[in-house]
Image (tube, helix red, strand yellow):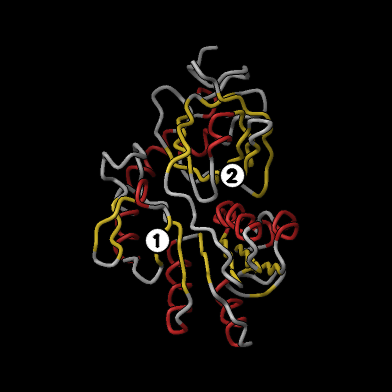
Amino acid sequence: MCIFEILEARDLAPDVRYLRIKAPKIARRRKAGQFVIVRATPDGERIPLTIADSNAEDGWIALIVQGVGKTTKIVNLLEAGDAIRDVAGPLGMPSRIERFGTAVSIGGGVGTAIAYPTAVALKEAGSYVISIIGGRNSSYVLLEEEMRAVCDEVYPTTDDGSYGYHGFVTDKLTDLISERRHLDFVLAIGPIPMMKAVAEVTHPHGIETVVSLNPIMVDGTGMCGGCRVVVGEETKFACVDGPEFDAHQVDFDLLARRNRAYADFERRRDDEMDPECVIGRSHTAPGATS
């Protein structure tokens, strides 16, 4: 059995963890925008997580996990030396990377984990890259140093004004447009309301805008149909047709309703969680064998 050992685990923000995982085959094939399906325990839920970074030579991938439900909280209890039972990928279509002129990579909260690798790829392709990274307060502005290392301009924003620009990422984007900055391409990743708002800002100006969708996923192959999204009045499967789509064509209202479909069930599962029975301090995840 393949064991995906955790090489590094650290906190990035409250309830947000960075995990660097040994996964040489995935690291060799992964491209910006792709994700993995993770299962922490033998009978656990399968969850999609975007590959935030990787190193093909050293054979690792990096995931950034926000503990919002039972499964993500279980994953975030793991430490270096533990292991994740299953990591399947890379899955999904890679980001469309080309020399766009000026490209804006927008990450809201944990969405920055997706915005970062795409920003790296856009810069390598020769684009002038502007990054807007937002959080509800300073604790949730993620990967700023990493973004500054690769982007031409970086604008951190906070909802409460505790750090950087006081306002939403859309407010800063609106400012850039008002300054008559010529923007050729915008990528936005974050909560559904944020991505919808970005699309509404860019649409009147005809700026090509792409969003990365993370709806309910189960198998990651399109077989279950759980990740259905409507794009331009066509049904798409985010796990195989995406996860990136034309923001001006996505039915965000339907996406939001579908993502809330299992909210009560997820809340009950979260209430059942007992951390003491989830992990022992061993070098394998619960139920894994070496």
Instruction: Specify few, some or many for label 2: CA neighbours under 10 Å numbering under 14, 14-19, or 20 or more.
Output: many
Residue 144's disc is none
Q: Is residue 268 above or below residue 33?
A: above
Instruction: Report the residue at 63% width, 33% height from top.
Output: 60
Distance of label 1 from label 2 (alpha carbons):
22 Å
Task: Name which of mark 1 and mark 2 comes first in the sequence.
Answer: 2
The one nearer the camera, 190 or 140, is 190
Q: Are marks 1 and 2 in contact (CB under 8 Å)?
A: no
The one nearer the camera, 171 or 16, is 171
Q: Is residue 2 above or below residue 61?
A: above
Kind of residue indicated by mark 2: Ile
Kind of residue indicated by mark 1: Phe
Residue linked to disc 1: 245
Q: Position of residue 151 (x, y in %)?
A: 70, 63
Instruction: Report the residue at 62% width, 83% height from top.
Output: 181
- Determine which quarter of the picture holds residue 265: top left
Q: Is residue 34 above or below residue 148?
A: above
Instruction: Report the residue at 48% width, 72% height from top.
Output: 198
Left-right relation of 132 to 164: left
Q: Is residue 34 above or below residue 25?
A: below
Residue 64's disc is 2
